[in-house]
Amino acid sequence: MKYKIIYQEDKIVKTKIIEANSFENISLPENTIEVKKEFFSLNLNSFSDSFKKKYIKEKELISLFYELSLMLDSKILLDEALEILIRNKKDKNVLEFLKTLQKSFSKSQDINKSLENFKINPLIKSYFKITQESGNISSNIKSLSTMINDNYEIKKEFKKAMTYPFILIITFFFSLIGIFKVVVPKFEFMFTNNKIQLPLATKILFITKDIFENYFVLLVFSSILIVFILIFIYKNSEKLRYKIDKTLAKNLFLISDLYKYKIFYTYFVILDILLKSKYEFHESLVKSRILLKNKYVLDKISQIENLLKSGKSVSSAFESTKLFDDITISLLNTGEITNSLDVTISEIKNIYKKRFDEKLKTFVLLIEPMFLVIIMALIVWIILAVFVPLWSMGDMLKV
């Protein structure tokens, strides 16, 4: 949800747009005059500001948090650990990032506001926000280090899986250009002159060739424009975003499971951290929402919170969402009865991590054959489109 904040600064009325999961997560400036929900807005300033943000490479962040985690495990204080890293890092953006962290923690400044000028994974900002509030710095940084390293490995595995299909598609695309420019026109001329009855596959091939020749540039620019428009509408339309997020979480074969398990793993990791920091279960649920970006899942978590407030049990509240399976519900029920929810949440976290890894392996195994089948089908279509009329011409010559 986007909120328009109207406030006064140096006797001047100013406005800014803030995106947050709920009103409670907003850090309001001093002398705030009014807060409005923005259902559809175009903030050109924030769009241009995104290009000015300081970028830090993901590998650099992984190394950074790994080193920070090791030092904190060695009982070095956070301020001292950050100071050691500042002395040993050379990159300007990394140095500024470390100094910003050091200042935010030493002066108890809002970490999200402090890191606004850095283009980094939102997960990192959310983790530090929770760390500021929970105070369990060592375990939180260790979890963050593990999480961003896992994310990096997932991206690496996905890129590796997509490399071969991508090369196939690019090769096939350039082959199509050659076929449409050189081969198809000769056959089209031949078939037209002989006035034979063309099969549907050949007609579609000739139509595709004409579109490709005459409207290729227009199609490319139109496709790019449509993508940008859809992204813009998705970000600004709450109803559309909810529907897309619901489809992504429920209705896509294999992808929905992969996506859902990743969200649940991240969510239960944060829940586990907060419970180990001696937070109450309900308070941990509320604070863990900070990591959720999917509107559909966020709505279901809000439903759980409301049911818990009304006196429902933890297991029945989770079960009512129909997002979690019987194993998760059973473990939550056991944890609630035995007063060991912190232990069961940790087990649930491990279950979702294992499920995600298994689904990712399945996805990687299926992606290459799927692309091969698609390319083979296109090749068969082109062969049939060209050779069926040739066979018809051969039969006519025999007669």
Image (spheres, rainbow, N blue to C red):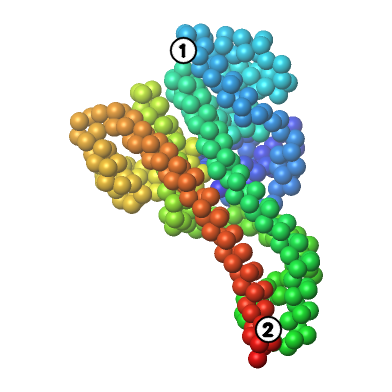
Decide: few, some or many residues near mark 1? Use Cα within 10 Å; few <14, some 14-19, many ≥20.
some
Residue 393's tag is: 2
Residue 66, horizontal then vertical, whole percent: 54, 19
Query: Which residue extends farthest front?
Result: 398
Instruction: Tell me the kind of residue under disc 1.
Output: Asp
Check the picture and name the quadrant holding the C terminus: bottom right
Query: Which image quadrant for residue 306?
Result: top left
Q: Nearer the viewer, mark 1 or mark 2?
A: 2
The vertical placement of 102 against 126, above or below, is above
Query: Disc 1 vs disc 2: Cβ atoms closer than 8 Å?
Result: no
C-alpha span from label 1 to label 2: 79 Å
Question: In the visual, does 163 lie left or right of 50?
Answer: left
Q: Residue at x 22, y 36 (%)?
A: 334
Residue 73, label in figure = 1
Can you give x and y, in whole percent of width and height, for residue 338 in the image? 20, 31
Query: Looking at the image, can residue 241 be seen?
Result: yes
Q: Is residue 285 visible?
A: no
Q: Earlier in the sequence, mark 1 or mark 2?
A: 1
Query: What residue lies at 44% left-to-right and 46% top-to-bottom?
Result: 362
- Residue 306, labelled with which disc? none
Residue 349 locus on image (x, y percent): 37, 34
Q: Nearer the viewer, residue 112 or 343?
A: 343
Direction from residue 391 to residue 345 in the image, left or right:
left
- Which sits in the foreground, 122 or 278? 122
The foreground one among 90 and 337 is 90
State whether residue 126 is above or below residue 294: above
Q: Is residue 391 above or below residue 178?
A: below
At label 2, which amino acid type do we have? Met
Q: Nearer the viewer, residue 269 or 215?
A: 215
Under tag 2, what secondary structure?
Answer: helix
129 versus 241 height, above or below: above
Determine crowd level at label 2: few under 14, some 14-19, many 20+ residues with C-alpha closer than 10 A. Answer: some
